[in-house]
Image: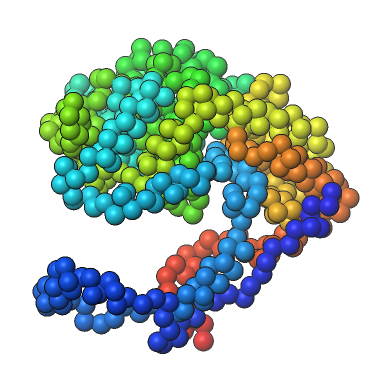
Amino acid sequence: MEGEKMFKQASWNEPVILSKGRKGRRGHLLPKAEEQVRQTIGDINALIPDRMRRKTCPKLPELSEVEVVRHFTRLSQMNYGVDSGFYPLGSCTMKYNPKINESLANLESFSMLHPCQDESTVQGILEILYKLERWLAELTGTHEVCLQPAAGAHGEFLGTLLIRTHHELNGEGEKRKEVIVPDSAHGTNPASAAMAGFNVVVVQSNEDGCVDLQALKAAVSERTAGLMLTNPNTLGLFEKNIEEVAKIVHEAGGLLYYDGANLNPLLGKARPGDMGFDIVHINIHKTFSTPHGGGGPGAGPVGVCEELEKFLPVPRVAFDGKLYHLDYDKPQSIGKIRSFYGNTAVLLRAYAYILSLGLEGLKEVAEVSVLNANYLMKKLKGIKGLALPYNSEKPRKHECVFSAKPLKGDTGVTALNVAKRLLDYGLHSPTIYFPLIVEEALMIEPTETFEKEELDRFVDAVQDICEEAYTNPEAVLKAPQNTSIPRLDEVRASHPRTMALSWRMYLKKQKQEQ
Ligand SMILES: *Cc1c(COP(=O)(O)O)cnc(C)c1O
């Protein structure tokens, strides 16, 4: 394959912007704005009380416009994103998000809103949030949805607090202390349960990669507060006994939590609420078109059954038939889990995405995301060195997990090495070493947004790399070579002592090193 030879990432020796500044350089002129302010509200300096005025100037870099543009263009050339090519990071749903949603979310009528504005002046955004709640309730089969959580894990935390509150109110708070989590769950599930004060009980998967019903029956008891189920699970498999799982937990008095972070494959096709689940979180930044990576911002709305609605955080967006308002009068609410009303700019993108696709479009998202994952799975299955654990004949949903264990045994080339070598082809690597129940895991999620040619390019690259591992393993072991930065020292790169997370830390470190 020629791909590897054709890709070469730009490499600039680009310093941090703070060290590029030169005193007196400007990228803007502001007199007009200053004059406008003076005309409308008078002399600003006279309006701000002395004790609140800044005495020293912030140490910002001073640069011309073209320097700023060049700086960020260069950095972008050394970067890789969904706009550059394939990005099959399993479980993360790194899909292409239509640019029109960005434009809509950036409209001034939204971006200039202030959360403290009077309700009468923000009817538009309240209507959008209200309608989005209705749509997400419809798509998840839940009764009410809360848009506040800022991420999937935050939604899980809210969900587990709801489980706790439910049992406390029934006088069973002391007794029901265990949350059951299958070993194929996303890693945030046990973490969230623990944060809400629960003990985590792990149940194993059977050879089909689904929850082992016997193990589940043995795990439930009067101590069970609930079960957190990731579906499709991290192997990309739909829990085939999901209704039976729900029944077992409900009969034991536990609540059912559905991790729907990866809703893509089910959109418009199946609803967690219909499967018996009491609480569902979804990830707006995965399924509903907010770009992510690098930490946010995101949104992890939570849908609940009728019985749990009264516990949802305040305020709730309400509609009296004429006007929208924010309802704080919810005496049984668990309170607030986030300032104001959630990441509205992220929620706006979801609104635009759903509105532009419609139900038929959302169904197509589900169909193509599943088709792409299964196409890739079939194509990769024949490659020497890779195995497909857990029922290799069973179709997957949005992703599939291969194991590079045979390759490692034969050649010494690991999943990490394969991932690094893929970068040399101008491709992003899949998620590796997750889920933990697959050794040398390569977790691949193509999403519905990449075309067949791009999927084929990935398959050809994996094929090339595996062949290379048998003939010239050294080349794979020292990859990547074609990227702006060669192989990182994984330990050093993530060690707090070597990281400089701010300009101040950076300067301090420089001084120490001198
Ligand atoms: C991504 C993901 C999460 C966590 O979502 P964040 O927004 O990263 O907190 C939880 N569960 C599953 C299955 C996921 O894929």
Horizontally, residue 10 falls left or right of residue 290, namely right
User: Quadrant of residue 5 in the image?
Assistant: bottom right
**Residue drawn where x is 16% and y is 68% of the image:** 40
**Residue drawn where x is 52% and y is 43% of the image:** 98
Horizontally, residue 236 falls left or right of residue 187, namely right
**329, above or below 293, in the image:** above
**Residue drawn where x is 76% and y is 32% of the image:** 379
Give 390 or 458, whichever is nearer the viewer: 458
Which colour scheme appears in the figure? rainbow
**Residue drawn where x is 75% and y is 44% of the image:** 457
Would residue 385 be seen by someone viewing this image from the given angle?
yes
- Can you name the residue that lies furthest to the right here? 471
**How many marks on residues?**
0
Give 409 or 106, whichever is nearer the viewer: 106
Give 369 or 304, whichever is nearer the viewer: 369
User: Quadrant of residue 250 in the image?
Assistant: top left
**42, above or below 243, in the image:** below
Find residue 380 and report its horizontal and vertical position in percent. 75, 35
Would residue 216 be seen by someone viewing this image from the given angle?
no
User: Quadrant of residue 193 in the image?
Assistant: top left
**295, above or below 40, in the image:** above
Find residue 188 and report its horizontal and vertical position in percent. 44, 40
Horizontally, residue 416 falls left or right of residue 321, namely right
Find residue 251 and report its horizontal and vertical position in percent. 36, 12
Find residue 483 and report its horizontal and vertical position in percent. 69, 62
